[in-house]
């Protein structure tokens, strides 16, 4: 009886609030000029940091990442864009406009949150926050795909021309792990059907680091018998 009474009281308290809300009309939903916006804004690049108190968010797609305190709302840049630009300007083969683009490109934060790798000119670069220095990890005309830090942050694995590679972040030493990749044999990379229907739309990565960062497991797809559509 007490549970029923509490339920009735809760319903009675909620009813006036619901009644005060404005009912949507067809004009609110479909009118080309007067309709209400219910879309809101979608966070870009949202990620919690290890301390559990801050998260990263990109205000817009052309701006650097911002470090936000979840309780106070205080905002600070993850890194100073001009310092990052300066580090990239020192690298040979990069134009000034490309160095500026690096500070506003696509980032992947290292597991220990000490740096990021950046895709630029179809290659992978690394920037360390504390040292304020940039390193070019790959230098190839071919496109590197699905790059991923090892759990200890010391290596980056990626796929190039359907072969799996790994590069040492500190030394820049690159090692090729598979050599039989081709348009019909994919190492560490999913085809369209697998990423769309099996693994999750947009997720093409088909390799995984071991927890101790010493090994890589990968999926190989042999599409020799699949016709091209």
Image: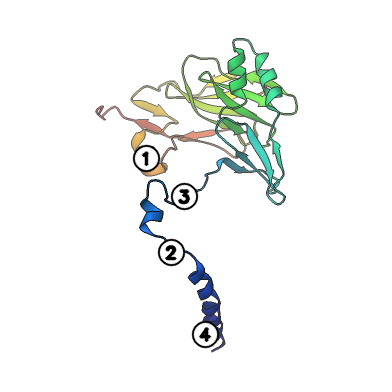
Q: Look at mark 1 in the image and give the residue it sits on.
A: 196
Q: Which of label 1 and label 3 is nearer to you?
A: 3
Q: Which of label 4 and label 2 is nearer to you?
A: 2
Nearer-N-terminus badge (1/3):
3
Task: Classify mark 1: residues with Cα within 10 Å, few (<14), some (14-19) or many (20+).
Answer: some
Residue 223: image location, x then y, percent: 31, 29
Residue at horizontal 33 percent and vertical 25 percent from the top: 184
Where is 178 relative to 90, above or below?
Answer: below
Classify mark 2: helix, strand or loop. Answer: loop
Task: Classify mark 2: residues with Cα within 10 Å, few (<14), some (14-19) or many (20+).
Answer: few
Q: Look at mark 4 in the image and give the residue it sits on.
A: 4
Classify mark 3: helix, strand or loop. Answer: loop
Residues under labels 1 and 4: Cα distance? 48 Å
Which circle marks residue 23 in the picture?
2
Q: Residue lying farthest bottom?
A: 1
Residues under labels 1 and 2: Cα distance? 39 Å
Classify mark 4: helix, strand or loop. Answer: helix
Residue 68: image location, x then y, percent: 68, 43
Which circle marks residue 159 in the picture?
none
Q: Look at mark 3 in the image and give the residue it sits on.
A: 37
Q: Are marks 2 and 3 in contact (CB under 8 Å)?
A: no
């Amino acid at each position: 009886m007490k549970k029923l009474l509490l339920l009735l009281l809760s319903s009675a308290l909620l009813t006036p609030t619901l009644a005060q809300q404005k009912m949507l009309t067809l004009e609110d939903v479909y009118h080309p000029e007067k309709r209400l916006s219910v879309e809101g804004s979608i966070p870009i690049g949202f990620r919690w940091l290890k301390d559990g108190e801050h998260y990263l968010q990109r205000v817009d797609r052309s701006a650097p990442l911002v470090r936000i305190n979840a309780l106070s709302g205080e905002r600070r840049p993850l890194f100073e864009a001009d310092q990052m630009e300066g580090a990239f300007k020192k690298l040979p083969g990069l134009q000034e406009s490309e160095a500026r683009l690096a500070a506003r490109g696509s980032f992947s934060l290292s597991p220990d949150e000490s740096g990021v790798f950046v895709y630029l000119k179809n290659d992978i670069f690394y920037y360390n926050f504390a040292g304020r220095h940039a390193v070019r990890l790959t230098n190839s005309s071919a496109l590197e795909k699905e790059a991923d830090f090892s759990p200890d942050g010391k290596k980056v694995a990626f796929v190039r021309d359907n072969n799996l590679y790994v590069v040492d972040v500190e030394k820049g030493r690159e090692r090729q792990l598979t050599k039989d990749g081709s348009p019909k044999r994919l190492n560490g990379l999913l085809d369209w059907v697998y990423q769309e229907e099996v693994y999750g739309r947009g997720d093409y990565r088909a390799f995984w680091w071991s927890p101790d960062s010493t090994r890589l497991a990968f999926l190989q797809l042999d599409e020799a018998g699949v016709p091209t559509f």
